[in-house]
Image (cartoon, coloured by chain):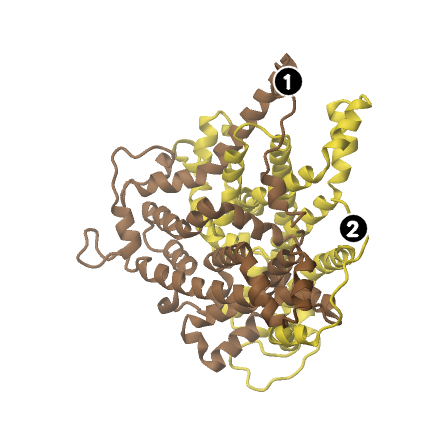
Chain colours: A brown, B yellow
């Protein structure tokens, strides 16, 4: 924990000579920095701005030529269409049969399940790899890490075969399993790095008291683990939510098993009349859960992100 | 970032530990290594359509076929173009962001939070927006990015974006740079702030100018960070899939290796070809990642 990258990034950096008046040169650079930062900010925010304002223009009044203009009057109809779809009786007809509501609920449920189970597995593995090293454990750990980087295409065809043979591909649990299994490396890594920071003396003390390995885990390690659990759960939540590759291969095109990303891709990729207002709203709806997590728990998200670089 | 040279003593060897991770080890062996072997095995057979009932081994024929497959070489060259622009673009943008922020500035937290949010959004959702904004219409009909360029007086930069044969892959890199720059920023910011302040001070006392301090004191310290960034971006780039699908579907002009693999498997049911492409992709990633894993593993040994 001493080399925690997130702490390093977020600690207030001491701007030296705060009180001193800036000379002309320094003033210039300060203004230059703010202008550049502002310009980049503008570029970074632009796509989300486009999503938001165009989702408020209704279903049909959205054109590329006015993509950046604010809506003249607020119209939330694109939201209800993107969420629940349209049927024959709706104005405009059946142009958009499937809304996102089913896929969103389904995704939320499966993602939470896989995140929690992943965290439990990761915690146990991380505990062993950090504190109960066995012969060859470093080698095994490196073998795990490789699994984090592979292109999943390299396992996909057998995986689909196995899932089909077992029959699990007819339920959403196929994705729960996939994300748990291929999440083992990163979850183990995050927990291991976290547990490495817990002083060995604590565990020694437990051993002196003749506590078993499980007992030490339960009464010393687990109570200290909350931050790592948050990091892993958020990480698994976000990556499973945003995943497209597993979803498209393992659930195929089946609309009954569509998740947020595949449903969105189906909506926006359809060759029918395109309603950009609905497209933008749908992208926004699909992005909202992970955005909300980021807004409230960004620090933990960042920690997960940086673990992926294997440093600290 | 002092390296502790005293190796932390592990607690003896514990069979108990092994027992608890054994299920995970077996799972990883089966689902990562076993399935890679299985994939490789399929890639050596003649399973090129659903109707093939009698499996025969054809050696490396599927691989040699790939070399002569115009669509594969096309997707590979697309991937190379994309990778170059994406890696350079993200590296430069992220590094500039880090440079602007590293010394601390009022409102830093605000900028940093915004710069990092794209990492939380899926390529598919962003693809939808960029699919729209990167529209090729120009002049009076222009909208999206082309319109924005006109408005700020950069009309000459207007472009066909992903529709054009030549520039398609370069324009695909724009959303990718947009999405990944924050990651690079975070890594470099951590790198910068890991450098002890004394080093700057010492250089300053010695009379070095600010630019000299950056060039000769700070930048050399960032070499390990740069390595990490390159590895991360490299393997993300080679695997790029969702972003392409999200913006332009399976269109030929923007097809990359991962997309072609999907098409071969999903649409053509040519599993032999699909697995061969997957193995090629795996090797490409492994060439980059395995040395990195060994390098970090060696460093770990001193922790």
Residue indicated by mark 2: B4
Q: As drawn, is B43 to the left or to the right of B49?
A: right
Q: Position of residue B144 (x, y in %)?
A: 42, 37
**Chain for numbered disc 2:** B
In which quadrant of the rendered view does residue B75 lie? bottom right
Q: Position of residue B269 (x, y in %)?
A: 52, 73
Q: Residues within 10 Å of mark 1 (few under 14, many from 20)?
A: few
A62 or A124, nearer to the observer: A124
Determine whether label 2 and label 1 are within 8 Å by CB.
Answer: no
**Chain for numbered disc 1:** A
B156 or A256, nearer to the observer: A256
Against B101, residue B91 (above or below) is below
Q: As drawn, is B2 to the left or to the right of A131?
A: right
> Is any atom of residue B164 visible in this view?
no
Residue indicated by mark 1: A26
A298 or A262, nearer to the observer: A298
Against B129, residue A167 (above or below) is below
Q: Residue at x 54, y 52 (%)?
A: B253
């Amino acid at each position: 924990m001493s080399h925690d990258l997130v702490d390093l990034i977020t600690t207030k950096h001491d701007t030296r000579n705060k009180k001193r008046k800036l000379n002309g040169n320094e003033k210039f650079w300060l203004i230059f920095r703010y202008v550049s930062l502002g310009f980049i900010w503008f570029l970074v925010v632009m796509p989300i701005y486009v999503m938001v304002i165009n989702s408020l223009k209704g279903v049909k009044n959205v054109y590329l030529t006015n993509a950046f203009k604010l809506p003249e009057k607020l119209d939330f109809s694109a939201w209800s269409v993107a969420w629940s779809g349209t049927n024959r009786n709706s104005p405009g007809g059946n142009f958009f049969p499937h809304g996102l509501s089913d896929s969103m609920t389904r995704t939320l449920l499966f993602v939470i399940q896989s995140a929690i189970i992943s965290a439990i597995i990761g915690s146990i593995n991380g505990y062993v790899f950090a504190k109960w090293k066995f012969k060859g454990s470093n080698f095994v750990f490196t073998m795990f890490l490789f699994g984090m980087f592979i292109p999943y295409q390299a396992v996909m065809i057998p995986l689909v075969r196995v899932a089909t043979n077992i029959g699990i591909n007819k339920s959403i649990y196929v994705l729960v399993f996939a994300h748990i299994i291929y999440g083992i490396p990163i979850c183990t890594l995050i927990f291991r790095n976290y547990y490495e920071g817990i002083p060995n003396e604590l565990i020694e003390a437990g051993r002196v008291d003749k506590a078993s390995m499980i007992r030490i885990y339960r009464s010393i390690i687990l109570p200290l683990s909350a931050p790592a659990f948050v990091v892993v759960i958020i990480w698994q939540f976000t990556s499973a939510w945003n995943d497209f590759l597993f979803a498209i291969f393992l659930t195929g095109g089946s609309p009954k098993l569509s998740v947020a990303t595949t449903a969105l891709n189906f909506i926006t990729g359809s060759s029918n009349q395109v309603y950009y207002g609905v497209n933008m709203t749908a992208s926004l709806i699909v992005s909202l859960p992970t955005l909300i997590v980021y807004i409230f728990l960004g620090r933990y998200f960042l920690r997960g992100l940086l673990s992926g670089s294997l440093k600290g | 970032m002092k390296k502790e040279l005293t190796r932390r003593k592990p607690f003896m060897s514990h069979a108990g530990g092994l027992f608890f991770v054994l299920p995970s080890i077996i799972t990883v062996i089966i689902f990562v290594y076993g399935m890679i072997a299985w994939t490789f095995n399929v890639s050596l057979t003649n399973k090129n359509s659903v109707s093939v009932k009698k499996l025969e081994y054809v050696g490396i024929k599927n691989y040699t076929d790939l070399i002569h497959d115009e669509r594969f070489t096309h997707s590979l060259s697309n991937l190379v173009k994309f990778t170059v622009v994406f890696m350079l673009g993200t590296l430069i943008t992220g590094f500039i962001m880090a440079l602007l922020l590293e010394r601390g500035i009022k409102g830093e937290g605000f900028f940093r939070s915004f710069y990092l949010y794209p990492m939380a959004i899926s390529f598919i959702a962003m693809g939808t927006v960029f699919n729209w904004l990167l529209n090729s219409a120009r002049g009076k009909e222009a909208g999206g990015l082309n319109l924005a360029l006109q408005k700020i007086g950069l009309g000459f930069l207007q472009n066909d974006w992903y529709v054009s044969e030549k520039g398609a892959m370069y324009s695909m890199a724009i959303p990718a740079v947009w999405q990944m720059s924050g990651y690079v920023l975070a890594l470099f910011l951590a790198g910068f702030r890991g450098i002890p302040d004394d080093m700057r001070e010492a250089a300053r006392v010695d009379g070095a100018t600010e630019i000299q301090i950056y060039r000769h004191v700070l930048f050399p310290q960032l070499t390990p960070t740069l390595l990490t960034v390159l590895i991360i971006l490299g393997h993300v780039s080679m695997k790029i899939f969702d972003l392409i699908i999200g913006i332009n579907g399976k269109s030929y002009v923007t097809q990359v290796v991962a997309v072609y693999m999907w098409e071969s498997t999903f649409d053509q049911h040519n599993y032999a070809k699909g697995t061969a492409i997957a193995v090629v992709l795996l090797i490409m990633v492994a060439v980059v990642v395995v040395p990195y894993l060994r390098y970090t593993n060696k460093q770990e040994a001193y922790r």
